[in-house]
Amino acid sequence: SQQGEEDPQALSIQEGENATMNCSYKTSINNLQWYRQNSGRGLVHLILIRSNEREKHSGRLRVTLDTSKKSSSLLITASRAADTASYFCATDTNTGNQFYFGTGTSLTVIP
Amino acid sequence: NAGVMQNPRHLVRRRGQEARLRCSPMKGHSHVYWYRQLPEEGLKFMVYLQKENIIDESGMPKERFSAEFPKEGPSILRIQQVVRGDSAAYFCASSPLEGLSLKTQYFGPGTRLTVL
């Protein structure tokens, strides 16, 4: 199964600190994407990184991809209480139509 | 341009009843995906449809579950004879792109199904 794993499962930090969460996957990918899900809501797309890219930035978000280790990390800098949510990575492959979602990291930012 | 719409947002059914979940993709999108999310878990792919075609249903249970995306109207995920284990959040996503190219899926708010 390509199902990814996020690490840690839960993370609690103070407002203003940086939050780092990791995602590992099992097979070769085409793209890797990060999504945020607020409690009881749908998923919001944050950022996409292609398999031939190593790092990407978007505002306070920084994503890295290491295809040799089959892992990605999402860094949120200067966190805010509004960043409190679950974060999922999702991968897609060249041979399939579906996205494979990880199990998620639950982030709590304490004001 | 409205986003992906799903209805109902919440659905309560008794065991043995049928559940119908609807998804209207974003305007101009002709590709629809359905996912299921159990509590405290990530999303699990169920089925991928284009207009009038099921492209990939590898994640959908063989029995009691069916999906369609007619030429006109929303995509429908149908669960017959629901059981308690079907209680979950069901998300629909749509995409304007097909094949192997860059693809981002836009998610609806989900339908939370509770089976009593």
Image (spheres, coloured by chain):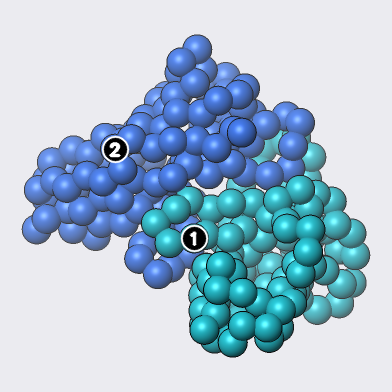
Q: Secondary structure at mark 2?
A: loop
The answer to whether marks 2 and 1 sit on the same chain is no
Relative placement, left or right, of A82 versus B17 is: left
Q: Nearer the viewer, mark 2 or mark 1?
A: 1
Residue under pointer 2: A8
Mark 2–mark 1 Cα distance, whole angstroms, equals 19 Å
Image position of B47 with respect to B79: above or below: above
Residue A59 lies, in percent from the top left, at: 33, 42
Residue at image location 35% in from the left, 32% down from the top: A22
What residue lies at 18% left-to-right and 58% top-to-bottom?
A: A81
Chain under disc 2: A
Q: Amino acid at mark 2?
A: Pro
Rate crowding at label 1 as few (under 14), some (14 to 19) or many (20 or more) other CA atoms within 10 Å. Answer: some
The chain carrying label 1 is B
| Place of residue B88 in the rendered image (x, y in percent of width and height, measured from the top left) | 52, 68
Q: Considering depth in this image, is A35 or A5 the residue closer to the camera?
A: A5
Q: Is residue B93 visible?
A: no
| Residue B98 visible, this angle | yes
Q: Which residue is mark 1?
A: B38
Q: Which chain is blue?
A: A
In front: B49, or A78?
Answer: B49
| Residue depicted at x 52% and y 84% | B116
Q: Quadrant of the N terminus of chain B?
A: bottom right
The chain drawn in cyan is: B
Type of amino acid at the residue the image marks with label 1: Leu
Name the residue: 51% across, 79% down. B114
| Quadrant of the image occupied by residue B70 | bottom right
SS at badge 1? loop
